[in-house]
Image (cartoon, rainbow, N blue to C red):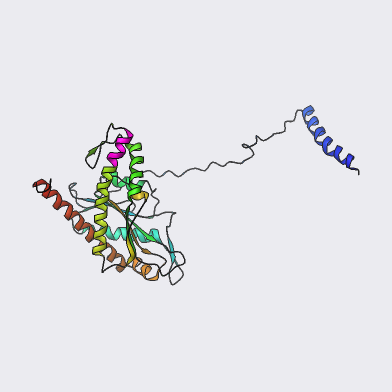
Amino acid sequence: MSFRTLLLIVLLVPALLLGGAVMLGVTIPVPHWGRDYVQRFVLAGETVPLDLPQIAGPEDSALPLVVIDAGHGGRDPGAIGTDAEGREVHEKDITLALALALREELLRSGRIRVALTRADDRIVPLPYRPEIARLLEADLFVSIHADSAGTREDVSGASIYTLSADASSEAAARFAARENDADRLNGIAIEGQSETVSAILVELSQQRTQEDAIEFSRLVLREGGDRLAFHPQPSRSAALAVLRAPDVPSVLFESGFVTNRLDRARLTTTEGQAQYASVLAQAIRIYFARRADVGNRQQDGEIG
C-alpha cells in the first residue's frame, strides 16, 4: 500500500464516520478540554460538631479551671513506636491515658475544676481544642503529646512548648481579623475597634497569657527535675496552632518519645503515667496558688 493511499484512508475514514453519524442523527459527545474529561467524585465531608465537654470537680465557678487536651485521637494515631514484642504503640493512646491520670490527680485536691477536650478515642479537630478552652473560660490549657525520632532510638526526654513571639504577633492579627467584635480579652475591650487596633489589643492580651504560660512551663521543669526524664533542651517555643488562644495561658507538653525504649516504658505503664500526672498536677497547684496570692495582694493594695 502506498503512502498516498494510507494517507487518504486516515483522512477519509473519520470524515465518513462523522458524516454518517450526522445523517443518522447520532450525537457524538465531545469533551470540554480542561473540564469534563476529568472524572470527579463528591466525597461526603465529615463534620464534627463542637460539643463542649463536661466540667468535673467542684461546682464553685470561682475555682480555677484547667482544660487538658489529649493530642490526636480517632483515625489519627499520632507518633507510632514499636515495643519489644513488635506491637505498635500509638501516641493517641498515651496522651489519653496521661490526660485521664492528670484529671484524677487534680480532682483529688477538690480545689481545681477539670475538663478534657476528649475523654475517649475520637477525632477532635485541631482548631476546636484551644477554642474549647476559650469557650469554657479556662484558666489554663495543657495539651499533652508524645514525640517520635524516627529510626533514632537514642533520642529521649520530655519537653514543654510555649507559643513563640513571632507566632504570637501573627496569630494576634488573624484572631483580631476574625473576632474583632468580641467583647473583651483578659479585661481588654476590643469591641468596635478597627482590625489594626484590635490586633494590637489582642497582642497585648497574648503577651500576658504567654508570660503566664512561660511561668507554668518553668514550674513543670522545676517540679519534674528529679522525677521525670527531660530532653537536654526541654524549654521550647514554636508556632503551634493549639497554643494560639489569646486569653488562655497554654502549653504543649511533649511527654517523651515513643521510639525510645525507656520513654516508652514510662509512658505505657500505670506507674509511669502516675508519675507524669503527679508532676504536672503539682505544677498546676503551685501555679494557681501563685495566681491567687497575686490577686489577694492586688486587692490589699500591695500591687498597683
Q: How many marks?
A: 0
Is residue 280 something that shows in the picture?
A: no
Residue 58 at x, y percent in the picture: 19, 51
Q: Residue 157: within the magenta? A: no
By secondary structure, the bulk of the magenta-drawn segment is best described as helix
* Side (left or right) of 60 relative to 103: left
Give the residue drawn at x 14%, y 49%. Answer: 295
Residue 40 at x, y percent in the picture: 58, 41
> For the view shown, which residue lies furthest in the right direction?
1
Relative height, residue 112 to residue 231 (above, below): above
Is residue 171 something that shows in the picture?
A: yes
Q: Residue 194: within the magenta? A: yes
Could you say which is closer to the camera, residue 196 or residue 52? 196
Query: In which quadrant will I find the N terminus?
Result: top right
Give the residue drawn at x 26%, y 60%. Answer: 220
Give the residue drawn at x 26%, y 53%. Answer: 213
> For the view shown, which residue lies furthest in the left direction?
300
| Image-quadrant location for residue 267 | bottom left
| Image-quadrant location for residue 183 | top left
Relative height, residue 263 to residue 58 (above, below): below
| Image-quadrant location for residue 119 | bottom left
Residue 165 at x, y percent in the picture: 32, 49
Could you say which is closer to the camera, residue 30 or residue 100? 30
Magenta residues (range): 193-202
Query: In which quadrant will I find the C terminus?
Result: top left
Give the residue drawn at x 85%, y 39%. Answer: 7
Residue 157 at x, y percent in the picture: 35, 66
